[in-house]
Image (tube, grey):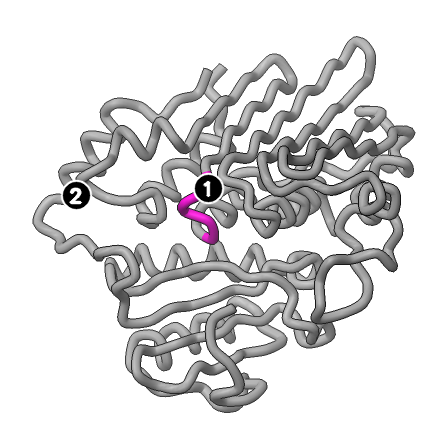
Amino acid sequence: MEDLSLHILDIVENATTAGATRVEIRIIEDTKSDLLQITIKDNGRGMDSQTLKGVTDPFVTSRTTRRVGLGIPLFEQAAREAGGRLSVASEAGLGTEIEATFQAGHIDRKPMGDMGATLVSLIAGNPDVDFVYECKRHGKRTSLDTRSIKDEIEGFTTISDPKILQLIREMVNNPES
Amino acid sequence: MAKLRVEDLKRIKEAAKGTVNLRAGEYRVKITVHLGTCGIAAGARKIMNFLLEKIQQTGASDIILTSSGCAGLCNHEPMMTVEVKDSAPVKYVLLDEEKAAKIFDEHVMNGHPVSEYALSVGSETTY
């Protein structure tokens, strides 16, 4: 993966595959402590403790199309290479929370990339899932809740309308303040 | 805090007026981009966003764009499947924007599959 936004896309796709109806993505960068923190929390079916143990093992996967699963291991590698770590908390029936930390200024810390494109891809592919996105970096803050956008446009158009998605992408990539 | 501005929503509502809204499940063409770990690493997100732009440009409201996971053909990524209603689905492999543009113009808009970019024709349906 070239950048962190692609890792996030991959991890959130896992969440929607696990039957989540709501996924929260939070990105917080604290320049003072040189910490970048990415949290992805879903209300999908979660994992039991046995499955959770093997979650960072590439040879553990729930898929049937191939025998290796690299989403979480690759994300963990990206965190470790940048002086951080990855942790997964999960409870069967309740959901999963993945937290990755990075030393923000580490030379091997991957760039954030195009979060707008990631969110738009997620929304287009999973229009029934509600996505919450919050990002606090470099003194700028972006926040988005697709539930409230859906409520606003109800009866006129849908969240997967390309015009709406274009607006969301612009909004996410150009935070105002 | 950046928000979807009221004027943006008004603009969308205006634009949406007069167009016939698609009812859920009703479509002429369904495009599925494979967004597994392998697909994403190979550039599937670029294809997804490119197709969204194309759909927006044409103003077509009868095309559904969606995503799926890994199909087990990771070395063929990025991939997408085009399903025109009442015809066999076509799986396209090793995509880039140029190929996606040709597939969109010829297959999605005009119903002629682009066989040179296809893996196979009619192998399976929606996941």
Residue A94 is left or right of residue B9, and the answer is right
Residue B126 is left or right of residue A157, and the answer is right
**Residue at image coords 44%, 81%:** B89
Q: Label the magenta part by its dominant secondary structure.
A: loop
Residue furthest top in the image: A32
Residue B42 is left or right of residue A101, and the answer is left
**Residue at image coords 65%, 17%:** A138
* Numbered circle sitting on residue A164: none
Front of the two marks 2 and 1: 1
Q: Is residue B28 located in the magenta-colored stretch of the structure?
A: no
**Residue at image coords 64%, 71%:** B71
Above-or-below relation of A128 to B96 = above
Residue B112 is left or right of residue A55, and the answer is left
Q: Give the image quarter of residue A59.
A: bottom right
Q: Which residue is mark 2?
A: B15
Residue furthest left in the image: B18
Picture coordinates of residue A15, whole percent (x, y) = 62, 44
User: What is the chain identity of the residue bearing mark 2?
Assistant: B
Amino acid carrying label 2: it is Ala
User: What is the chain identity of the residue bearing mark 1?
Assistant: A
Picture coordinates of residue A80, whole percent (x, y) = 90, 36
Q: Which residue is mark 1?
A: A129
The part of the chain drawn in magenta is: A125-129
Q: Secondary structure at mark 1?
A: loop
